[in-house]
Amino acid sequence: MEIRAHQPLHHLPNRKTNTVYILALTLSPIINMLVRWIVFQLYWSDPVNSLSGENVVPPDHWIVTILSSVLEVILVAMAVVMVKSLLHQVRFFRKLLLSFGVLATIDLVLNIIATIISIYSFHVGSFLLLGLSIGIYISLNLVFFFWYWYDDFPTQVRRLLHPEAPCSIWFPREAVDSNARWIPTALDYLYFTVISSNTMGPPENHSVIGDKAKILQLMQSSGMLILLVLVVSRAVNTLE
């Protein structure tokens, strides 16, 4: 995103930019709902489970499912409210974004827990589990896509005002032309997020500078490690 010299920085991010990240993060709980629905559909439609005396869903799974469902309804409602609030330029909008991100992150963690419980309680495996892991992978990337933008964007704007101020994430474009009035776009953050998930580290020529960004990287790497070890590895082991 190129910034013209006369463009007022206090107008950033604009409504369109905010909306992109809000809608992207809203997809995360929707995907989580779909993942759980698929697991339950498989479980209750399986004649072995329906006839078995051990087909009772574990209480911890019910608790996680109920909490996740409530959170997801709240998140979808919040997304609608925030998109509407963009039209009125709510002054405390960043606090709303923070709450939105925190709830979406909690929902992601609960969904991972529910999936792990399902693996051992419903004996989910094979190709279905690979499909579920893809859903979790997409949901995880959407959540961290939001968080990287939320943490880094203000530091990028501050850099335009004070070139000596450090950014949370260093992009190659900044090294090519340090005087460019440039702000990372959604594609830049998406690239950074996906490559960080795939390699469990920042992409080549990118640097994580800020403390919050480093914490986000650690959390993202840990989430991917859990996904690979507990979900994908079991899916591969149960392939027939």
Image (spheres, rainbow, N blue to C red):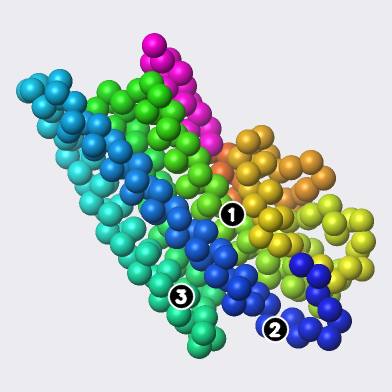
Q: Is residue 81 above or below residue 156?
A: below
Seen as rendered, the residue at the extreme top is: 240
**Residue 110 screen position, x and y as percent:** 35, 46
Q: Name the residue under label 1.
A: 145
**Residue 61 screen position, x and y as percent:** 23, 40
Q: Main secondary structure of the magenta part?
A: helix
N-terminal of the pair, mark 3 or mark 1, is 3
From the viewer's perspective, tell me whether residue 179 is left or right of residue 93: right
Q: Which amino acid does label 3 sit on?
A: Met
Task: Give the residues in magenta.
Answer: 224-240
Give the spatial CA distance, label 3 vs label 2. 19 Å
Q: Mark 2 points at which residue?
A: 10
Quarter of image, res 201: top right
Q: Is residue 119 above or below residue 61?
A: above
N-terminal of the pair, mark 2 or mark 1, is 2
Q: Is residue 208 above or below residue 12?
A: above
Q: What element carries label 1?
A: helix
Is residue 180 a member of the stretch shown in magenta?
A: no
From the viewer's perspective, tell me whether residue 88 is left or right of residue 58: right
